[in-house]
Amino acid sequence: MNQKINWDALGIWTSLACAIHCALLPLFLSSLPLFGINIIDNLAFEVSMILLALCIGTYALYHGYKKHHHSPLPLILFFLGFAFLVLKQFFIWYENWLLIPAVTLIISAHLFNFRFCRIHNHAHTDDCDH
């Protein structure tokens, strides 16, 4: 069985999972510290989620850029959104205000990449290496 992974879909789902974690987890699971579980303000968990989003997103968008559409727009949107995501970690007081544009830009980057890949469908230019 030879199945291909849709990296854009995985990136979108990862971004949504991150948004759900950041927005809903504090609301619904605020009682976890009573049981000795501290996932809400766990720096290691936050950093690992951000690094996971960076790895999947960068791979998916770079693959689409290099192999399909050659448009830098998805990469620009992703890294701008990722900058907001990192800033969210440093400016705790503005966490929700920074999270909204971060998630919006990251998901938009994946949606644009997905659309550009489907429109161009291996439109080759002189700079292609395949």
Image (tube, rainbow, N blue to C red):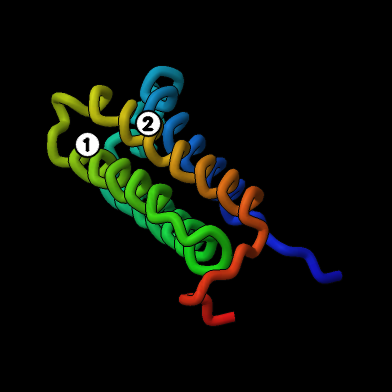
Residue 104 placed where, x, y %?
40, 31
What residue appears at the point 38 percent right and 55 percent down from the top-left corner?
A: 72
The circle on residue 26 is none
Between disc 1 and disc 2, whose residue precedes? Answer: 2
Q: CA distance from mark 1 to mark 2?
A: 10 Å
In the displayed structure, 32 sits above or below 46; it is above
Residue lying furthest right: 1
Amino acid carrying mark 2 in the image: Cys
In the displayed structure, 118 sits above or below 96; it is below
Q: Quadrant of residue 77?
A: top left
Q: In the displayed structure, does residue 46 sit left or right of residue 86?
A: right
Amino acid carrying mark 1 in the image: Lys
Mark 2 lies on residue: 22
Circle 2 SS class:
helix
Residue 2 placed where, x, y %?
81, 70
Residue 130 placed where, x, y %?
59, 80
